[in-house]
């Protein structure tokens, strides 16, 4: 197996493990759904989740994608 491919696959697994550890699925999904039900803007949801879980907004967006969650574009802000 190609060393770069192995490193890349390992890095992907490590990143997924870290995301699950820092942003547990059930808690993350509950917080996400709360903000979504309150119809906050995408940027606000991402920012708030970033603050709650103390991770980057990029990590939040990646986790949203991993969990198959959707963010609607809305008008409210916190």
Image (cartoon, helix red, strand yellow):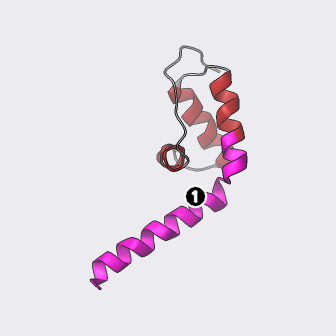
- The image quarter containing residue 45 is top right
Q: Work out which residue is located at the far front of the displayed protein and give it.
A: 68
Residue at left offset 44%, top offset 66%: 12
Quick one: quadrant of the C terminus? top right
Relative height, residue 30 to residue 13 (above, below)? above
Q: Main secondary structure of the magenta part?
A: helix
Residue at left offset 56%, top offset 47%: 67
- The image quarter containing residue 40 is top right
Relative height, residue 4 to residue 31 (above, below)? below
Give x and y (percent) for residue 34. Answer: 70, 30
Residue of label 1:
19
Q: Residues within 10 Å of mark 1 (few under 14, many from 20)?
A: some
Give x and y (percent) for residue 58. Answer: 46, 46
Q: In the rendered structure, does residue 10 fall within the stretch colored magenta?
A: yes
Left or right, 1 with respect to 30, comes to: left
Give the total of numbered labels. Answer: 1
Q: Nearer the viewer, residue 61 or 29?
A: 29
Residue at left offset 58%, top offset 50%: 55
In the rendered structure, which segment of residues is drawn in magenta? Answer: 1-29
Q: Secondary structure at mark 1?
A: helix
Give x and y (percent) for residue 37. Answer: 67, 23
Residue at left offset 51%, top offset 50%: 66
Q: In the rendered structure, does residue 36 fall within the stretch colored magenta?
A: no
Left or right, 15 with respect to 31, comes to: left
Quick one: quadrant of the N terminus? bottom left
Relative height, residue 56 to residue 10 (above, below)? above
């Amino acid at each position: 197996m190609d060393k770069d491919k192995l490193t890349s696959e390992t890095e992907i697994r490590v990143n997924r493990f870290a995301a699950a550890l820092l942003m547990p699925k059930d808690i993350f999904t509950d917080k996400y759904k709360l903000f979504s039900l309150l119809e906050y803007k995408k940027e606000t949801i991402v920012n708030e989740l970033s603050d709650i879980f103390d991770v980057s907004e990029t990590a939040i967006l990646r986790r949203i994608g991993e969990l198959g969650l959707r963010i609607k574009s809305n008008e409210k802000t916190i």
